[in-house]
Image: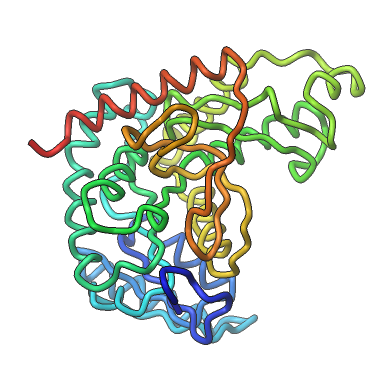
Amino acid sequence: MNVNGRITPMSIAPHLVVIGIGHVGSDVVTNAAALGLFSRISLIDVDKKVRDGQALDNHQATAVAPAMTTTITAANYDACRSADVIIVSAGPSVLPDSYGGGHDSRNSLAQVNSKVIREVMGNICQYTHSAPIILITNPLDVNVHIAATEFDYPTNLVVGTGTALDSARLRRHLADWAGVSPDSVQAFMLGEHGATAFPYLSHASIGGLTLAEATTALGLQPLSPDQVGNSVVQSAFDILEGKGWTSSGISKAAVSLARAMLLDQRSIHPVCTLADGVLGFHSEVSLSLPTVVSGHGVEHHLNIVLDEWEQEKLLVSAKAVREVYESVRPA
């Protein structure tokens, strides 16, 4: 349950609301049910037939061994009244030919999904101002900014999955390069969730070694930040081109954030939030930075140190996000 804007760890009957039951939303429900932390999962979608069918399918699946006690039901927005966490994946996904396609493709998607997010937030606000909201809908940074600045909702409770998925791809890339488990890699992609995301390599580590030290210790070829960043961003396009959408990684990232909030973990995630009082930003943009996440939602951002290349990339990301937001900003 929520007490003074903070989730009390391990509520008696934790309640998750998932809004938008497409490819991503359905994977969110499956992963959340498998986690075993939620007593109830409520599904909301504009397509009532899809919502009802997905709810029934997932609810019946909880009886398959190992059986779960989670109750999964179709719902309306009034379910948000008792929500401990809300995950929003409503709206169309980025198409394979538009990911990383530059300003025009981001603009086109923003024209559609900004309206979706404004409608969703308006509905949520009728029933709660205390449940953390985890946004997935693209263009993510723009939609987080809309939710955080255009509604009377606590900004610490508005969080986007941000570059959590991009960062997982980066850790996989570095792990493959070094021949180690991703568990041994500490590294983040930062900035925009999209084409201008960049790898924060100056403070990345492998087994406690800096990348320069790991290069020497393991006899590896040095890495180029530009090449690493391009490879990570391109991998998302490759997935989209192959299957038409991405859902597996992003749904796990969203559920991981929900878990961090529900358990009051105070763990560090590269989530998208309103950038206020950090790295020279003062609420003019929302993007991904290393952030402590707890039952309070956003506890605080880490005051990280960027090298010159990273600082330049961060400003490029901020400019890209801001330009798209301005194109859908209310008159």
Residue shown at 74% from the left, 41% from the top: 182
Q: Nearer the viewer, residue 263 or 58?
A: 263
Residue 155, placed above or below residue 236:
below
Name the quadrant containing residue 113.
Answer: top left
Residue 302 visible somewhere in the drawing? yes
* Residue 271 drawn at (x, y percent): 49, 45
Is 323 left, or right, of 285 in this rendering? left
Residue shown at 49% from the left, 67% from the top: 30
* Residue 173 drawn at (x, y percent): 67, 31
Residue 249, placed above or below residue 134:
above
Q: Nearer the viewer, residue 67 or 226?
A: 226
* Residue 324 drawn at (x, y percent): 25, 28
Residue shown at 44% from the left, 35% from the top: 193
Quarter of the figure that contains the N terminus: bottom left
Name the quadrant containing residue 87.
Answer: bottom left
* Residue 252 drawn at (x, y percent): 54, 55
Residue shown at 28% from the left, 75% from the top: 52
Is 177 left, or right, of 92 in this rendering? right
Quarter of the figure that contains the C terminus: top left
